[in-house]
């Protein structure tokens, strides 16, 4: 029987389809339940420390135990380790030897934000402020005139670590002020990137003085008194503090159809949660499954808690020791899905995207063969064979996926943890959820893409 022209064309041409035309109706309640649980993760994790703590609580509820060096491990065992309260690694020991490699999903749980400077508190014109230093790639103009919260820790000289949460729930929130349009004529002429200088990102803390008219710094004193009463901290303690200013908004459904999710910190908690939820459900994977929730990706993956830290190698080395397998043998047979978000095509800004190669909302988890900028600079560029492996794994598991680049070639770019995994001699491919207004205080993703990313992570662990 000869093919008709139409059949032949269908066979030869790629047929991209909206995920809602590909996902079975029976999966929709699962998608909704998954997204409801993801929203809880977001609302309980506005900093990397909070995400790490919540992830560990989830892991323990699913039978994971804290790993100790030298622990005997057998297939099916579930362990986790936490690096300095900011990064979590989870493992489910596989049926196969570690010599046959691990299957890793690596995501990051830090997000762009405003950190406090080491000497943050001051008073000006009888108003009290905190000076901030932004963390990661932010568009500064987006952070003014929105309600803000502060989360973090103050480490005291005696070693006590005091957790601090200010502005949550019904508590008073914070704000960075901006010019009124009536006086904004000069500011209006500036490029967006210059209109709000970094040194203007000062958090308004209060206005009510204490003490008598002859006293000085009365508002600053009031603020410091409140902090002392609540947390027992003094101004010098800011020196050894990590206080992060984050948007006060909670996650919410977006759109009349409720098909999208708006929240702070989708990048990259949306993939972190996908990798986490998927590993919690694993029972007896062939390869040892590893979920890596890294810190410091937004500033280059440096530092003891970033993906470049030896903490990852140390943990896998320890696991390998339990089977007398050399780490280098494990790594060279491993696969890593670098699970990080990418830019979703935004019809409001068609000029920055190359439409044929852009990730689209509701087209599923987006694979990125390479990231980087211009001539793929700073990209690990996965091999064709690695992409083929992932195509097969995702198709076999009915995962809706797409392949994409970030935007127009000459315009910009970005990186993920992929290169740091690939540098370890682990075959690595980027994949993740397409995001609208990525790195904004309030980012938007589609429920279908979130769910498909979770399914994709599960398929990789189980491959
Ligand atoms: Mn990211
Ligand atoms: Mn990012």
Image (cartoon, rainbow, N blue to C red):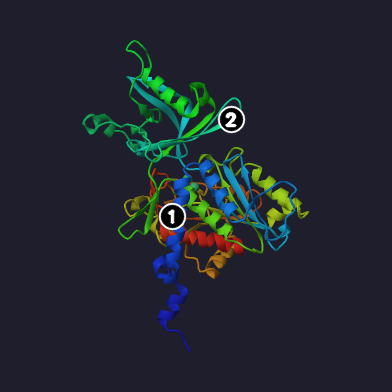
Query: As drawn, which residue projects farthest toward the top?
Result: 214
Q: Which residue is mark 1?
A: 434
- Can the viewer see residue 145? yes
Residue density around tag 2, few if under 14, some if 14–19, many if 20 or more, within 10 Å: few
Instruction: Using the image as rendered, state which of residue 320 and residue 85 is in the foreground.
Output: 85
- Position of 350 relative to 15 (above/below): above
Residue that appears at 63% across and 53% down = 64
Element class at badge 2:
loop
- Residue contact between numbered discs 1 and 2, judged by CB atoms under 8 Å: no
Residue that appears at 55% across and 45% down = 53
Residue density around tag 1, few if under 14, some if 14–19, many if 20 or more, within 10 Å: many
Residue that appears at 47% across and 87% down = 2
Q: Which residue is mark 2?
A: 160
The part of the image, by quadrant, that contains residue 6 is: bottom left
Element class at badge 1:
strand
- Position of 329 relative to 397 (above/below): above
Disc 1 to disc 2, C-alpha distance: 40 Å
The part of the image, by quadrant, that contains residue 132 is: top left
Left or right of 171: which side holds 152? Answer: right
- Position of 163 relative to 461 (above/below): above
Q: Residue 442: percent from the left, percent from the top?
A: 38, 46
The residue mark sitting in front, 1 or 2, is 2
């Amino acid at each position: 029987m000869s093919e008709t022209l139409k059949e032949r064309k269908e066979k030869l041409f790629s047929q991209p389809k909206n995920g809602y035309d590909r996902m079975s109706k029976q999966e929709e309640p699962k998608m909704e339940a998954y997204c409801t649980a993801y929203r809880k993760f977001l609302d309980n994790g506005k900093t990397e420390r909070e995400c790490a703590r919540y992830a560990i609580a989830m892991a323990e509820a699913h039978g994971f135990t804290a790993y100790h060096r030298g622990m005997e491990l057998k297939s099916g065992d579930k362990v986790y380790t936490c690096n300095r309260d900011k990064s979590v690694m989870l493992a489910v020991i596989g049926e196969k030897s570690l010599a046959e490699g691990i299957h890793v999903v690596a995501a990051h749980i830090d997000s762009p934000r405003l950190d406090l400077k080491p000497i943050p508190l001051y008073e000006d014109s009888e108003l009290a402020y905190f000076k901030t230093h932004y963390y990661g790639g932010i568009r500064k103009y987006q952070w003014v005139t929105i309600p803000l919260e502060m989360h973090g820790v103050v480490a005291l000289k005696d070693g006590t670590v005091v957790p601090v949460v200010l502005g949550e729930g019904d508590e008073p929130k914070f704000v960075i002020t901006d010019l009124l349009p009536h006086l904004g004529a000069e500011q209006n002429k500036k490029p967006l990137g210059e209109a709000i200088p970094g040194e203007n990102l000062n958090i308004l803390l209060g206005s009510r003085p204490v003490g008598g008219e002859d006293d000085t710094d009365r508002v600053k004193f009031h603020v410091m008194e409140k902090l002392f009463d609540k947390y027992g901290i003094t101004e010098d303690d800011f020196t050894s503090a990590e206080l992060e200013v984050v948007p006060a908004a909670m996650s919410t459904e977006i759109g009349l159809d409720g098909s999208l999710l708006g929240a702070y910190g989708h990048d990259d908690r949306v993939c972190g949660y996908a990798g986490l939820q998927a590993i919690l459900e694993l029972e007896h994977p062939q390869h040892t499954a590893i979920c890596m929730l890294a810190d410091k990706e937004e500033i280059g993956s440096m530092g003891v808690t970033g993906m470049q830290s030896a903490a990852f190698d140390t943990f896998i080395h320890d696991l390998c020791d339990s089977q007398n397998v050399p780490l280098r043998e494990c790594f060279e047979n491993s696969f890593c899905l670098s699970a990080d978000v990418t830019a979703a095509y935004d019809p409001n800004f068609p000029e920055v995207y190359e439409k044929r190669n852009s990730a689209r909302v509701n087209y599923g988890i987006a694979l990125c063969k390479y990231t980087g900028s211009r001539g793929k600079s700073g990209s690990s560029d996965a091999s064709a064979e690695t992409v083929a492996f992932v195509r097969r794994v995702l198709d076999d598991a009915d995962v809706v996926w797409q392949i994409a680049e970030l935007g127009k070639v000459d315009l910009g770019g970005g990186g993920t943890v992929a290169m740091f995994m690939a540098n370890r001699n682990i075959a690595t491919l980027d994949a993740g959820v397409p995001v609208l207004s990525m790195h904004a205080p309030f980012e938007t993703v589609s429920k279908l893409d979130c769910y498909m990313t979770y399914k994709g992570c599960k398929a990789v662990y189980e491959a």
